[in-house]
Image (cartoon, helix red, strand yellow):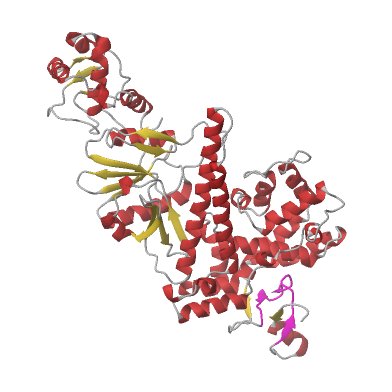
Amino acid sequence: MVGPVAFGCRLCTARRTGEPARVVRYAARWERVCVRHGRWALDADADQPLEYLDVQGVPEVGVAQRSWWGVVRRAARAGVDAGEVFGLAYAVVARWWEGAYGWEQEEIWPRRLHQVAGGDAGSDLEWWRAVGRDAVIFPEVVAVADALLDPVMAQLVWADSGGERPRALPADGQFCRRLGERLGKQWLGPLIAVDYGCPLLAWMGSVIRLRRHPGGRPGPYARFDENPWWVRQEHRPSTMAAGLRVLSREKKAPGSGTNWRAVVPAEQRFLITNLLGEAEEQLQQLHGAQVGTTAEVARSMLEGLSRGSDLLDQVLLRVMVAAVNAGVRLDMEVAFSSPAGQVTQLSWEQAVTSVRFEELAPVSAFPVVPGRRWGPGWWWSATTGRHVVHGSAAMRTQLMLLDRDPAVTGLAGRPVRFAWRDETDGRVRSWVPQLFARYADGTGLFADCPSSPASGGARAQRAGAVLEAACARVGWAYQRLEPLLAVVAGNLRWLAGYRHPRYRGPSGLQAALVEAFAVSRPLLEGAASVGDPLQVLPVVYHALWSGQLAAGLDEPLHGGSLVRVPADGGPERGSGAGIDMLGGE
């Protein structure tokens, strides 16, 4: 064997011999495109009936084939084997292909896959993913090979590593951002920067080692360290024949009858194991002795917890994808961390009737982003007497509003992850709502708290539509809560400072306030009529928060604001009497 075996183009054969005979030839993966007839030659050793894929509707594949020969010339000038460069780029992009199920922004690959499948892959999506992978990702493979040969890109890797002053590679490094831009996928950079254990990271490590040790390093593995184009065994993509064999086994024993190692590709198993190891290592570091100021230690621990939680979140999503690929039905599932700390996954309908979402810990931590003016925090809820985690100023404001609503009996931040299979492209989608509120009638509200109506982009809008339909089926609700007017939010923040029961005051004082404000009158005047304003005002503010007294909050609250007892004599929390709560800041 001198290389992979592929079918030849019958039309080209007929042009040369006068007869469209079936031809099998040795063809490397970078010479599979018949540019003249727009065909991609498939592997001849796979058990499937097709000889080629029609790529005339995907012109970028033909363009990439022509561009490849320029990459070959650049590799020759650099003294590098073009086959090794292609092999590394192919391993890098094939790994991205396996993880693309979770990439909401990826729209090009699904379009190409459906195109080579004749317009619609339909229910055979997984079969087409195995057969069409190499053709679909070929343009990106050529682009990555070209980028890895560019000395400027190697210099960016060196700069990201700190040069002569070594440091850990950052999650927002220049190299990953530039690579994403060269591929026309600006969103890709941050994703690949945190894909630990990938062949791209191994290449970056080799580039850095060769810069720091030009003469090489001693040891049994030195020859591998000195060759940045070497692809480790665990990084090498599976062949089309192997992928089809896995699908064949799955059809014979669908669902839970399949074997984990038979159904889940080696790359995915390796990635899941690697992510678990990374998470374990990240969390174990928090057991060590903490040294430094309180602020520094707290910041370090928050970043460590956030990173560990993000890694576990990735593991959860990838295991979900593996389960779906194994035939496990996934209409709408929810994953959450039980009170005992065990991650549990149930169908949505089952979870609604059996899970107390308001008592759950966050299934995924809010990210800690260095340099951002606002980070995660805790809100003490007057409704529950417990703390609720929040991740932004907008979410804290919505928590204040719900905490003031007498119909709300429970609150929780990010308690569950929703997961479902998208009917349009067959990919597994997931979403973690920021907030959950339980109402007195037993129904619930899942909500997101964007800082502006357009926050989150198209992905958030699509997820919101799916969650709204799922909640409506069980009589619940999902909402994207609009930001409050700035003046309303400011008044709520002030009143929230007096939400604790300690500001309720003695029963006699409460009765005196009800009598003083039986008729609408200015806040300071009514407080002074009851007693010393320094002692009475905190009780007035608590009464305004709890709804025993009412005032218009659409104007700044001051000593002249008119305060009254609610018309029905009961709490008006959340009723919004006399105010317009929604709007732009």
Image coordinates of residue 139 in percent, x first then y, are 67, 63
Magenta region, mostly helix, strand or loop?
loop
The answer to which quarter of the image holds residue 111 is bottom right
Q: Is residue 246 left or right of residue 257?
A: right
| Residue 314 in the image: above or below residue 21 | above
Residue plotted at (40% across, 54% down): 342
Image coordinates of residue 274 in percent, x first then y, are 59, 58
Q: Is residue 563 rendered magenta in the image? A: no
Q: Which residues are magenta?
A: 23-44
Q: Is residue 438 left or right of residue 316?
A: left
Image coordinates of residue 475 in percent, x first then y, are 24, 53
Task: Look at the image and tell me in which quarter the C terminus lies.
Answer: top left
Residue plotted at (31% across, 57% down): 351
Please state which of residues 72 and 161 is positioned toward the viewer in this rendering. 161
Please state which of residues 313 and 146 is positioned toward the viewer in this rendering. 313
Image coordinates of residue 319 in percent, x first then y, are 48, 62
| Residue 102 in the image: above or below residue 378 | below
| Residue 359 in the image: above or below residue 469 | above
| Residue with the most extreme front position | 289
Q: Is residue 271 left or right of residue 575?
A: right
- Res. 369 in view: no
Task: Look at the image and tell me in which quarter the N terminus lies.
Answer: bottom right
Residue plotted at (73% across, 66% down): 87
Count of number-bearing discs? 0
Q: Is residue 38 rendered magenta in the image? A: yes
Residue plotted at (27% across, 45% down): 438
The answer to which quarter of the image holds residue 34 is bottom right
Please state which of residues 574 and 184 is positioned toward the viewer in this rendering. 574
